[in-house]
Amino acid sequence: MNLITLDSKIIELKRIGIADTTLASISGKIYAKSINKNDTLTDNFAFTNVWVRDLKTDSLIGTTSDSKGEFQFTIPASEYDLQVQFIGFNNLKIKNVKVGTGDIISFSAILGQGDGTTEYKWNQAEFYNNTNK
């Protein structure tokens, strides 16, 4: 039997503010999209891995979403690949996300069932134009 796959997608990735700090903060919510008996279900996705790989140092920083699919962590200003992963679902990868000192970032996504990777290239103009000042 062939597994029906659903693409993963970004709901939101934007800077929503700037804090007076040396680190950036990223928080949001992860959802799951799957097909069960011909119905497409979307629900909060608990215990999903959300992490970044620093493109300069190759270091990893991340967390796991809580029981409501929510997560939060801090990172230094740098350029990252942002990833969301859970076994049995398509991974989501956003390449070359540039994060500045004090950025407060809101990121939410839907992981679709499958075993591949959905990749996006970061859009700087969209990221900064959505900033609430």
Image (spheres, rainbow, N blue to C red):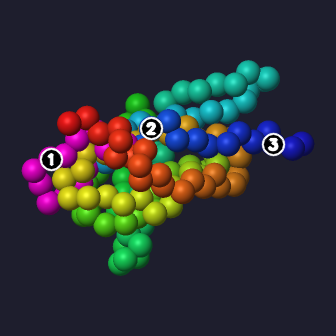
**Which badge, 2 or 1, comes first in the chain's sequence?**
2
Instruction: In the rendered structure, find residue 30 and report the number of the disc placed on it.
Output: none
Q: Nearer the viewer, mark 1 or mark 3?
A: 1
Residue 127 appears in the figure: yes
Q: Which residue is mark 2?
A: 12
Residue 71 in sight in this render:
no
Residue drawn at 35 percent across, 78 percent down: 57
Of the image marks 1 and 3, the number of the one nearer the N terminus:
3
Q: Up-down: is 132 above or below 122?
A: above
- The residue wearing badge 1 is 19
Q: Residues within 10 Å of mark 1 (few under 14, many from 20)?
A: few
Q: Is residue 45 left or right of residue 107?
A: right
* Magenta stretch, residue numbers: 14-25
Q: Residue at x 24, y 63 (%)?
A: 76
Residue shown at 26% from the left, 63% from the top = 77
- Residue 64 is situated, as x and y percent measured from the top left of the image, at 40, 49
Gap between marks 1 and 3, in whole Å? 44 Å
Nearer-the-camera pick, 91 or 106: 106
Whether the residues at callouts 2 and 1 have beta carbons within 8 Å, the answer is no
- Look at the image and tell me in which quarter the N terminus lies: top right
Q: Secondary structure at mark 2?
A: strand
